[in-house]
Amino acid sequence: MTSAAYKANLKKLTVLAVLVLLAAVAYMLVSVQFDNPKLLQYALRIRAPKLIAMLITAFAIGGASIVFQSIINNTIVTPCLLGMNSLYTLIHTAVVFCVGSGSALAANVNLSFAVDLLIMGVVATVIYSYLFRKTNHNILYVLLIGTVLTSFFSSIQTAMTRIMDPNEYDTLLSTLVASFSNINSEVILLSLLLLALLIFVLRKELALLDVLTLGKDQAINLGVDYDRCVRRLLLGVTLCIAVATAMVGPVSFLGLIIANLARQLLKTYRHSQLILGSALFGMLVLVGGQLIVEHVFAYAIPISVFITVGGGLYFLYLLLTNRRA
């Protein structure tokens, strides 16, 4: 990559960062009564945790999506194929089905987050580390098994909802879509610490991403332990998605949208720029989308609906353009 292209990408990232900052300021200050200090303080206190949660979610999903696509060597796949979103819905459905929506496991935000994160973390660690070794380090087999697990989790969840009490099902529905309305500050802090720890543990593998995308043979010739790096990065991707999903709920198509927007805008192989670009696009989409949801649609439609519809259309566009190419 030439010096001119590198500087051009830095300018694009700077513009994206400024747009994110403007969106964040607009989200915090739109429809705020500045002449009433108490109402101003109350509005900022309510909106700040939601804004921080959106920024963390965008960073986790954006970075994980870029890493996942580079590992798979395919730009139209998303980490949701690993089954974490389906596992999240299964966990919440099973809790309501077994102990009821009024139980502590369902009603307590901190406890619910801990259960989600524990189960998804253990499943990701056990299943994907084991499968990667069992399939002789074949990443495509692992992806296929992840797709099968997604269908398996969804089938069990569907069976439970069909025989569940209708009143319990109505209560359950609100927890199965991504929501930034009721974010606990303690959950935000824990998520931030977990993501920071994950980045620190995987710092060496993340630094080798540019080399890994050259292919297995080339990476091995350059002295990289390819299978170990890919296994650790795949596990890191799964845990990142688990943290983001446990915090706000499943946002299936967000990774696909922001990762490909970053690739199309920057047109580079440098993952430091791609990850940052994907995260900034995610922040812009989430903050701008939530601003529209709250002040245009008055919370009538959750942001996940817009992301799913837009992501589906964008996915079809990517399929058609890649086919022509």
Image (spheres, rainbow, N blue to C red):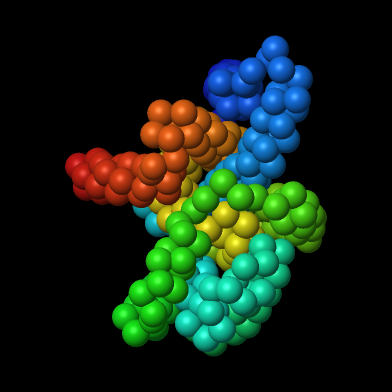
Would you place residue 52 above or below residue 18 in this image?
below
Q: Is residue 230 visible?
A: no
Q: Is residue 74 left or right of residue 52?
A: left
246 vs 58, nearest the viewer: 246
35 vs 26, nearest the viewer: 35
Q: Is residue 100 left or right of residue 169?
A: right
Would you place residue 39 above or below residue 192 in this image?
above
Query: What residue appears at the point 66 percent right and 74 percent down from the top-left corner?
Result: 104
56 vs 113, nearest the viewer: 113
207 vs 81, nearest the viewer: 81
Where's residue 15, x and y in %? Answer: 57, 19
Query: What residue appears at the point 46 percent right and 59 percent down from the top-left corner?
Result: 174
Q: Is residue 116 left or right of residue 258?
A: right
Where's residue 150, x and y in %? Answer: 41, 74
Q: Quadrant of residue 241?
A: bottom right
**Rendered-image quadrant of the C terminus:** top left
How many numbered markers are drawn?
Answer: 0
Residue at the outermost top position: 35
Query: What residue appears at the point 56 percent right and 84 percent down from the top-left corner?
Result: 99
Q: Is residue 51 visible?
A: yes
Would you place residue 84 above or below residue 194 in this image?
below
Q: Quadrant of residue 200?
A: bottom right
Where's residue 313, x and y in %? Answer: 27, 44
Where's residue 168, x and y in %? Answer: 44, 73
Query: What residue appears at the point 62 percent right and 68 percent down from the top-left corner?
Result: 107
